[in-house]
């Protein structure tokens, strides 16, 4: 999982961006490709991420990402919970 550190929020908490494809479960990826469009897959992952504090992140620096206000050690657990919610 590749996470990119971005500017802190207004309270000084660290923020990281994760690409939405790293939050999609690998075992169901092929099945979703056959039935859903790319946009539908992204919205599905984003909906699950929002329940854990994720926000859409689009800019010239990084497109198709989900931003989280979390420490780096918390990110693997967040991604795991998103994958479990989508399975």
Image (cartoon, helix red, strand yellow):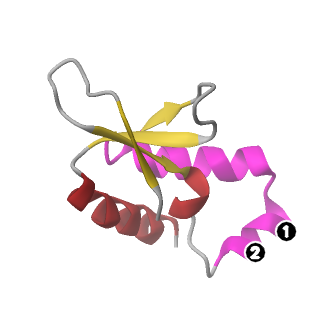
The quadrant in which residue 61 appears is top right
For disc 1, the neighbor class at 10 Å (few under 14, some 14 to 19, many from 20) is: few
> Which numbered marker is on residue 34?
1
Q: Are marks 1 and 2 in contact (CB under 8 Å)?
A: yes
Q: CA distance from mark 1 to mark 2?
A: 5 Å
Q: What are the residue bounds of the magenta stretch?
A: 28-54
**SS at mark 2?**
helix
Q: Is residue 82 above or below residue 60?
A: below
- Judge the density around disc 2: few (<14), some (14-19), many (≥20) Cα neighbours within 10 Å: few
In this view of the protein, which residue sits in the foreground, 45 or 9? 9
> Would you say residue 42 sits in the magenta stretch?
yes
Compared to residue 63, the image places residue 29 above or below, namely: below
| Residue 22 located within the stretch drawn in magenta | no
Q: Residue at x 42, y 39 (%)?
A: 67
- Quadrant in which residue 17 is drawn: top left
Q: Position of residue 18 (x, y in %)?
A: 47, 50
Residue receiving disc 2: 31
Query: How many marks overall?
Result: 2
């Amino acid at each position: 999982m590749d996470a990119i550190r971005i500017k802190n929020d207004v309270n000084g908490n660290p923020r990281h961006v994760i690409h939405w494809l790293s939050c999609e479960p690998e075992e169901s990826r092929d099945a979703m490709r056959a039935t859903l469009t790319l946009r539908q897959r992204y919205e599905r992952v984003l909906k699950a991420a929002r329940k854990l504090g994720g926000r859409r992140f689009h800019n010239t620096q990084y497109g198709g990402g989900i931003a989280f206000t979390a420490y780096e050690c918390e990110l693997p657990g967040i991604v795991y919970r998103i994958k479990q919610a989508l399975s």
